Amino acid sequence: MIEILLVDDESYVTESLKKTIPWDSLNVRSVYTAASAMEAIEIMESQAVDILVTDIRMPEMDGLELAELTAERWPHVRRLLLTGHSDFDYAKKAIQLQVADYILKPVDDEEFMKSLLAEIDSLQDEWKAADRYRKLLYDRKSDEGVLKERLMSDLLLGRAMSRLAIADKLRQYEIPLAPDAPALMMLVRLGGRFDEYDKHSLSLMEYAVGNIAQEVMGDSYRVWSSKAPHDCLVLLVSVNPDGPLGGAVRPLREEMGRLAAQVGKQVRTYLKGDLSIVLSPWFLFPEGLADAYRNALGTLFRHGGTPETSVLFQEDYPSERSAVRSIESLYRPPTLIHLLESKQWDGAREKIDEVFGFLELEKASVTREHLYEVYLSMTNAYLYLAHRQGALAEEIYAEGFDTRVDQSLILSPDRMRRWSLDLLEKLKLSLSDTDPYARGHLIKQVQELVTREIGMDISVKTIAEKVYLHPVYLSKVYKNETGESLGDYIIRIRMEKALYLLKHTNKKIYEITTELGYQNPQYFSKMFKKQYGMTPNEYRD
């Protein structure tokens, strides 16, 4: 659906067009109007405008200047000019600016719709072509990666496949491993700085780690790097039969440990993160892969995760069945759900610390089932509290309540601890604002953010993101508590700082404009005049 902005200092023109044109039949969803270029810029900064229709003759900034500025800041926006002057210079300038059309006033509705429809059709054709191109690129790049990852997952989980099918897929996907060849697995978990990354960024880092491993292994080895089912990275290594070592050699433990350590060192140097790596014994690929993966996964869970890169040899950690212990602190009164229900936030934090303190103390015997138990218990408590307060949990923290269990959480106590505490803080901020003290704290926090970041790209939306609330809800709370809208408060603080800079410094108007976070000096002057009844230059004089 198309969004259109009509700009004319004679408001009856835009209002007439807005009311008389059958916008629905043109597939137009929203029609915005502005009485000046400055107001138009403000609208385009907050709305997804597709087509700009602007008068030429306007005070402060004319339509040609607005069209030129729009081309610079929003090059995707189509531009049409309205004018009552059929002057050739205007038409010439419009052609230079590559505007879509040049329409004389008074506007004939049929001619206007004809010009507008041509641009709408052109836009939609452009969008369809772009979508087809992006889909083609995505399909070409992602399909093979998805298929490789799926094959790795099937092999790691021991799913039955015929030897012929495996060989065919390896050849089809150009995977550099051969059936019945000796292979070694490096199971890698990214930690340290990588724990702060979102899933997309983490996948890019895993891709980079795979590339680093291939460079470290050089021509002597063939490496297949792929995501594993349990949020780890698998590096399958086999000797290159055409390389310096020859195909029959199985390098010694010390050599493979050195290479793994070198991978970790390169990752720390270039990606600034840490790795935990478990090296399996040599096995025949693919028959021994599933057993090697299960054993390495258990070793990685129980013994990996040191502050710096660690290299563990699976043969040093034989499979053992440890005695299973119950997480009694999880169920000892007062439980987490009772603490949350009574909004005892400090007590809830202490309960979380107690649970994870037990997991750390009993690390050798803790299993993924234990972490899954903790995950379910805490998720249940958080959901209960959110619903009791009449809120949807996904509105508070959508990614924290994914119905699919994040495998990284049940693999890492540290990640689950951070997730638990992060979620607790978001619940506290979102559900405590009914208390006068909490509301006052929120207002103070917002005002501190505005004051501190006034020279940055600050808006109600960016402030709301920093305090983990919806912009509409934050605006409502702020207005109820202060009697002033948050948007007006932001403008007022900017203008107060502008007064100080105009009075106490020799900075030029454009320098003050930039320092206050505005991008256009004319827009800043308009806002200043609206606030104080005079322009910045008049005030300084």
Image: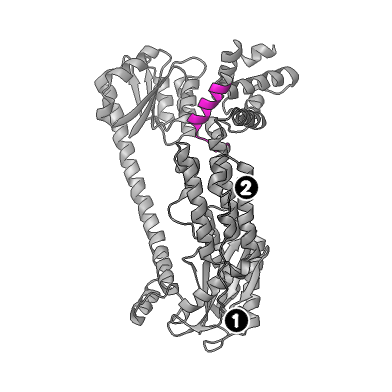
Q: Which residues are magenta?
A: 467-481
Judged from the image, the secondary structure of the residue bearing numbered disc 2 is helix
Q: Is residue 480 magenta?
A: yes
Q: Nearer the viewer, residue 124 or 417?
A: 417
- How far across and down, in percent of the image, does residue 398 sit? 47, 45
In contact (CB < 8 Å): disc 2 and disc 1: no
Q: Residue at x 38, y 62 (%)?
A: 143
Colour pattern of the rendering: one colour
Q: Residue at x 62, y 70 (%)?
A: 364
- How far across and down, in percent of the image, does residue 289 sit? 47, 78
Residue 344 in sight in this render: yes
- How far across and down, in percent of the image, does residue 457 sit? 58, 33
What type is the residue that disc 1 sits on?
A: Glu
Tell me the number on the disc at residue 168.
none
**Residue 80 vertical placement versus 366 (above, below):** above
Q: Is residue 352 magenta?
A: no
**In the picture, which quadrant includes the C terminus?**
top right
Residue 215 in sight in this render: no
Q: Residue at x 56, y 18 (%)?
A: 483
The residue carrying mark 1 is: 315
What type is the residue that disc 2 sits on?
A: Arg
The residue carrying mark 2 is: 349
Q: Total label count?
A: 2
Dividing the picture into quadrants, the one containing residue 451 is top right
| Front position among marks 2 and 1 | 2
- How far across and down, in percent of the image, does residue 181 sit? 47, 84
Q: CA gap, disc 2 to disc 1? A: 39 Å
